[in-house]
Image (cartoon, grey):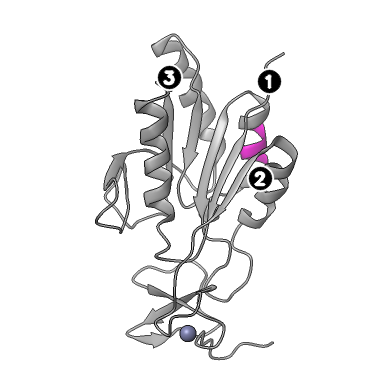
Amino acid sequence: MRLPGKLELIVGPMRSNKTAELLRRIETRREYAKQCVMLLKPSADTKAAAGLVESRNRNGCGKMKAIEFPSADPWAVLPIVADTEQRIGRRVDCIAVDEGQFVADLFLFTKKLLDSGHDVMVSGLELDFRGLPFGEMLSLSWLVRTYAGNLTEQVAYCSCGAKALYPQRLVDGKPAPYASPVIMAGDNYEPRCEKHFVLPGRPH
Ligand SMILES: [Zn+2]
């Protein structure tokens, strides 16, 4: 029986350096721990070029090559992991996923990887532009508690100086209405506090 892996969860709003932190941890594992780390990028993440994960923080590790997979079907990754292990003749120690909020079946997929003995690192948004749970990110905290590991909350600030809790979506510089789609091309975000988070047409 293989020991289950551990989960490192990195959460926070836009511009809280989640991706930079994920890339830093991958680099540390590869460089110092000599681990094989596979970085995965869901197809719905379009902020960098294909096959690349890029941090918006210019002082961070910058960008890193990633394996792109369909957001709707993370299971397509399992044969790639198996092929890689066959090719390199050893285990993949850790699997890292950026922008986890986009991934369907994220809870079960992460659990499956942990159960099969891989460490997993996931970074992403817990709340969407409406301030509602985004994908299955919030559910992953159960896996952190159950499988050990850790949860890191990256902090971002509103322009007023308060801690930002929400990703404010802006379209043409204006707050996007509640009824706009959850995943939308050409949108723009900034981190906002409770007081400055604006959501026209919100029902509650
Ligand atoms: Zn504010």
The tag earlier along the polypeptide, 2 or 1, is 1
Q: Quadrant of the N terminus?
A: top right
The answer to which quarter of the image holds residue 184 is bottom left
Residue depicted at x 38% and y 27%: 30
Q: Residue 115 versus residue 148: which sits nearer the camera?
A: 148
Amino acid under disc 2: Phe
Is label 3 in a helix, a strand or a loop? helix
Magenta segment range?
A: 107-112
Cα–Cα span, label 2 and label 1: 19 Å
Q: Which residue is mark 2?
A: 107
Q: Amino acid at mark 3?
A: Thr
Give the structural element (helix, strand or loop) at label 1: loop
Element marked by disc 2: helix
Q: Is residue 181 above or below residue 177?
A: above
Residue 37: x percent and y percent? Answer: 43, 29
Label 1, on which residue? 3
Looking at the image, the residue that sits furthest to the top is 89
- Mark toward the start of the polypeptide (3 vs 1): 1
The location of residue 142, given as percent across then percent down, is: 73, 47
Residue on which the image places disc 3 = 84
Where is residue 110? Give x, y as percent: 62, 38
Residue 23 visible, this angle: yes
Quarter location, residue 83: top left
Q: Residue at x 42, y 30 (%)?
A: 29
Which three-letter amino acid code belongs to the residue tagged 1?
Leu
Q: Is residue 42 in sight in this rendering?
A: no
Question: Residue 148 magenta-drawn?
Answer: no
On whether residue 111 falls in the magenta region, the answer is: yes
Image check: 201 left or right of 190? right
The residue closer to the viewer here, 131 or 3, is: 3
